[in-house]
């Protein structure tokens, strides 16, 4: 069964202190070729029937993301698809 995934990220112009903390820690791990890091979140929605992208966008806009400071994308993945795969 397909799953709807909502990815929420801070808008590019908004300071991301979590991302900065990770970026600052990377050189201590020997990673010196990363210019910046942004931290976001992934929300997976399983509908009881057919997945509804329009409904998922409405949910994301009203509940999952703060549209003043965050952007979001909505896409379908299969329920058995690995967490790092994209459609």
Image (tube, rainbow, N blue to C red):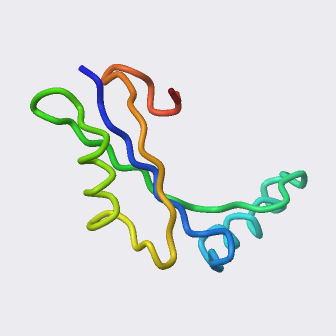
Camera-side residue of 77 and 36: 77
Q: Relative to 74, is 49 above or below?
A: above
Q: Relative to 13, is 57 above or below?
A: above
Q: Quadrant of residue 11?
A: bottom right
Camera-side residue of 34 and 54: 54
Q: Which residue: 85% across, 59% down?
A: 35
Question: In this rendering, would 35 be left or right of 46?
Answer: right
Q: Which residue: 32% across, 37% down?
A: 4
Q: Quadrant of residue 59?
A: bottom left
For the N terminus, the image quarter is: top left
Residue 28 in percent (x, y) is at 81, 62
Q: Which residue: 74% across, 64% down?
A: 23
Residue 66 in percent (x, y) is at 40, 73
Camera-side residue of 9 and 57: 57
Residue 81 in percent (x, y) is at 41, 22
Q: Quadrant of residue 24?
A: bottom right
In the picture as drawn, the residue positioned furthest to the left comes out as 48
- The count of marks equals 0
Q: Which residue: 28% across, 67% down?
A: 62
Q: Relative to 45, is 63 above or below?
A: below
Question: In this rendering, would 20 be left or right of 39?
Answer: right
Residue 25 in percent (x, y) is at 74, 66
Q: Relative to 72, is 68 above or below?
A: below
Question: In this rendering, would 9 be left or right of 33?
Answer: left
Question: In this rendering, would 28 be left or right of 9?
Answer: right
In the picture as drawn, the residue positioned furthest to the right comes out as 33
């Amino acid at each position: 069964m397909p799953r709807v995934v909502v990815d929420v990220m801070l808008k590019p112009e908004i300071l991301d202190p979590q991302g900065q903390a990770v970026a600052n820690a990377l050189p201590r791990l020997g990673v010196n070729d990363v210019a910046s890091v942004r931290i976001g979140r992934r929300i997976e929605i399983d509908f009881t029937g057919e997945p509804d992208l329009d409904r998922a966008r409405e949910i994301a806009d009203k509940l999952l993301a703060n549209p003043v400071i965050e952007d979001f994308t909505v896409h379908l993945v299969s329920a058995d698809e690995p967490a790092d795969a994209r459609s």
